[in-house]
Each structure stands twice: as structure tokens, then as C-alpha cells.
Image: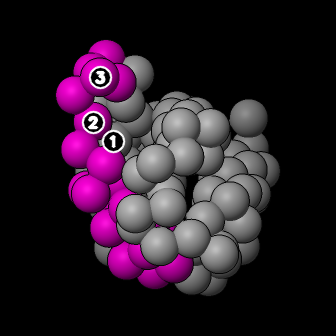
Amino acid sequence: MDNLVTISKMILHIEKIQEYIKDLDYESFSKNEMIVEACAFNFSQIGELSHRLEDGFQKSNPLIPWKAIYGMRNKIIHDYDGINLKVVWETITEDLPVLATQLRKII
């Protein structure tokens, strides 16, 4: 898959997460199992897509935390019951907007 197509897909998954939580605070988010699961799924997709990027492409974009992105995917996939929802919420509200901006700059 072309790197730019992959980046575009990552952005779409970020936008889905942002749409799901746009009217929520942490408490509402943490109590809504369907939203939590939808966000977890999209995080897993973002991580999986990041892992498909060519190594050279990742190295040419060192400001993006590729290992952390894939690490979040691994945490969700392999330890779903142990996910700290506060960390997920902070990642959604603090890190995803920055990541989306960085990825849009690549395209």
C-alpha cells in the first residue's frame, strides 16, 4: 500500500475518534462502553496502518512517534482488559490532534 494512502487512512481513523468523543467529557466517555470500544478499534487500526509504512518513510518523518502509535495498538489488542481509560482519553484529547496535524503536513 502506498505510504500516502496509508497516512490518509490513519487520518480518517483519527477523525472518527474525534467525532465519537466531540460532545463528551472523560466521565461520559468512560461510562459509554460502545464509544470506548469504537475508539479502541480505531486506535488499533491507526497502529496497524503505521506498522505498514516503509521504514524509510518512517525515518524520513522522525517527529511522529511511530513506536508509540504501534505500542498503543499492541496494548489495546493484547491487553484490552488492562487498558487505562484515563490514558486513552488523554491520548485522544491531547495527542491525536497533534498527530492529525503532523500527518496532514505529510500529505
Label 3: few (<14), some (14–19) or many (≥20) C-alpha neighbours in 10 Å: few
- Image quadrant of residue 74? top left
Task: Specify start and end residues of the magenta stretch as a single range.
Answer: 78-99
Mark 1 sits on what residue? 72
Indicate which disc, 1 or 3, sits on the residue closer to the N terminus.
1
Left or right: where 79 falls relative to 20:
left
Q: Disc 2 or disc 1, which is closer to the eye?
A: 2
Q: How many marks?
A: 3
Where does the image place residue 90, in percent across and percent down from the top left?
32, 67
Name the one closer to the observer, 17 or 101: 17
Quarter that holds the C terminus: bottom right
Where does the image place residue 9, in percent across and percent down from the top left?
73, 50
Q: Residue at x 23, y 44 (%)?
A: 84
Q: Residue at x 74, y 35 (%)?
A: 1
Amino acid type assigned to the residue bearing label 3 in the image: Asp
28 falls in the magenta region: no
Left or right: where 84 falls relative to 33:
left
- Image quadrant of residue 24? bottom right
Asked if disc 3 and disc 2 are in contact, CB closer than 8 Å, the reply is yes
Q: Secondary structure at mark 3?
A: helix
Q: CA distance from mark 2 to mark 1?
A: 10 Å
Label 2: few (<14), some (14–19) or many (≥20) C-alpha neighbours in 10 Å: some
Mark 3 sits on what residue? 81
Where does the image place residue 4, in percent across and percent down from the top left?
72, 57
Q: Secondary structure at mark 2?
A: loop
**Predominant secondary structure in magenta?**
helix
Mark 2 sits on what residue? 83
Where does the image place residue 31, in percent across and percent down from the top left?
46, 48
Can I make out residue 67 in this image?
A: no
